[in-house]
Image (cartoon, grey):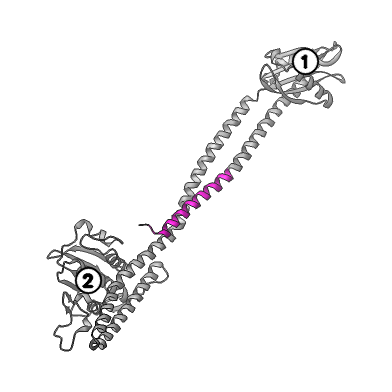
Amino acid sequence: MTSPAARRLRRLRWTLTLLFAATTAGCLLVLATLAAHTDAHSRARDLDNDVTRRAGGLARALWFDDAHVLATDPLGEDELARGAAVLGAVQTGPGGGPPTVLRWARPGADRLPDRLLLTRLWDQVQDTQETELATGDGGGRQLRWAAAPLWDGDTIAGLVLVGADPAQSRADHERLVRWLLLGCSGLVLAAAGVGHLLSGRAMRPALAGLERQEQFLTEAAHELRTPLATLRLVIERGAAAPARAPQALAEATVLSERLARLVTGLLARARVEAGTQRVELTPLRLDQLIEQTVAELPAAMGEPPWAFGPGDDRTPGSWGAVTVELPEAPLVVRGDPELLGQAVRNLVENALRHGGGSPVTVVVEPGLISVTDAGPGVPAQRREAVFRRGVTGGGGGTGTGLAIVRWVAELHGGSARLLPGPDGGVRAELRLPQD
């Protein structure tokens, strides 16, 4: 089940994704608006420059003869004329005023400006004596017109009219706007995906740290449950029988020392997993460590080992349901005593808990610690899964115990695995490099 803190982190990730996408969308919207506005002005300017250039160039190519008649022969040959969509040349009548005499038109007179627009262009040209621009009807379509003056001596006696259809330019502009919208939408989606990926990567350490914290709390509870229960039992025994109070106090002291070692080991493991501390591997007697670790397990005898009275005939190395087989020669390895003791303790407790009451044998050999029981065993398909954190059931695995065993083994450069026992059950192996 996902913890509330993890859910908050995931909600924060989606919030950051939306903020990233919204910021990107805002920036792209501004850029797209500027691009569309610039393109529209650029196309309009290019269209005006084109008709102005054509009208001015053609006006310079025309002249009036001695009879003050406009010669239009160049309009049929000039390259500027061939590229014009609508072209016309008009001159004033005998009485002057706005031009009324059509001298040349292509594709036809019906495509030239109407009388009202022509008069307006004439007035503007008369006023500025330069080429003028206007937008108006030309044969039922809105065209962009340029009117250039035709000089007869010192008098403006006619106009060259060049019209261009802005429909294609508008269509190209609209196509650009559509592509901008599609491109920006795609970029926003891509930005949202990248933002979601980056926020996930940024939060991955936080989620991993949170998961490690939750795992540590679970493992701490797992490690401390048995000694705390035993300590409570000892205290209750001492309180119920005042005569046993001194013995109960001694037992409680030993238990408190074991709890202190457990807490120290848990803190060390938490610091190592968090990366704030490196594990220190020192030479140690593995045979003595295993013997001491098993001796401190209350479940190995059904009662605490320190409860034996004087004259107890049980020999070292054999404690009730747990038998320890040690090598004759001292066995030295490099390792952390607290972590190795914790791993062995988890293996033995796991065997006692899931061994169905069968005897448990701990064998210590060079580079190998094996814990064997004759219980129901673990199916072959689950022997690897039980080493993962949180996996329980299947006759083995405690949800945390075996996961800690493998972690400790890998920390020491070794390995941990489960094998079938010789009499059924499970043989758990913890392999360590020899010193």
Residue 284: quarter of image: bottom left
Measured along the vertical axis of the image, is residue 15 above or below residue 337?
above
Q: Residue 24: tell me if it is visible.
A: yes
Q: Residue at x 52, y 43 (%)?
A: 187
The residue type indicated by label 2 comes to Val
Q: Residue at x 62, y 38 (%)?
A: 35
Q: Earlier in the sequence, mark 2 or mark 1?
A: 1
Q: Is residue 335 magenta?
A: no
- Left or right, 259 with respect to 367, comes to right
Please state which of residues 260 and 122 is positioned toward the viewer in this rendering. Answer: 260
Measured along the vertical axis of the image, is residue 203 above or below residue 43?
below
List the single residue furthest toward the front.
240
Q: How many marks?
A: 2
Q: Secondary structure at mark 1?
A: strand
Count neighbours of disc 2 (C-alpha within 10 A) and say few if under 14, some if 14 to 19, many if 20 or more: many
Which stretch did the figure color magenta?
1-28
The chief SS type of the magenta part is: helix
Q: Secondary structure at mark 2?
A: helix
Relative image position of residue 325 (x, y in whole percent): 17, 76
Q: Which mark is residue 90?
A: 1
Relative image position of residue 20 (x, y in whole percent): 52, 50
Q: Residue 411: tell me if it is visible.
A: no
Image depth: mark 2 or mark 1 in front? 2
Whole-angstrom CA distance, mark 2 to mark 1, is: 112 Å
Q: Is residue 19 magenta?
A: yes
Q: Which mark is residue 188?
A: none
The residue type indicated by label 1 comes to Val
Residue under numbered circle 2: 348
Residue 33: quarter of image: top right
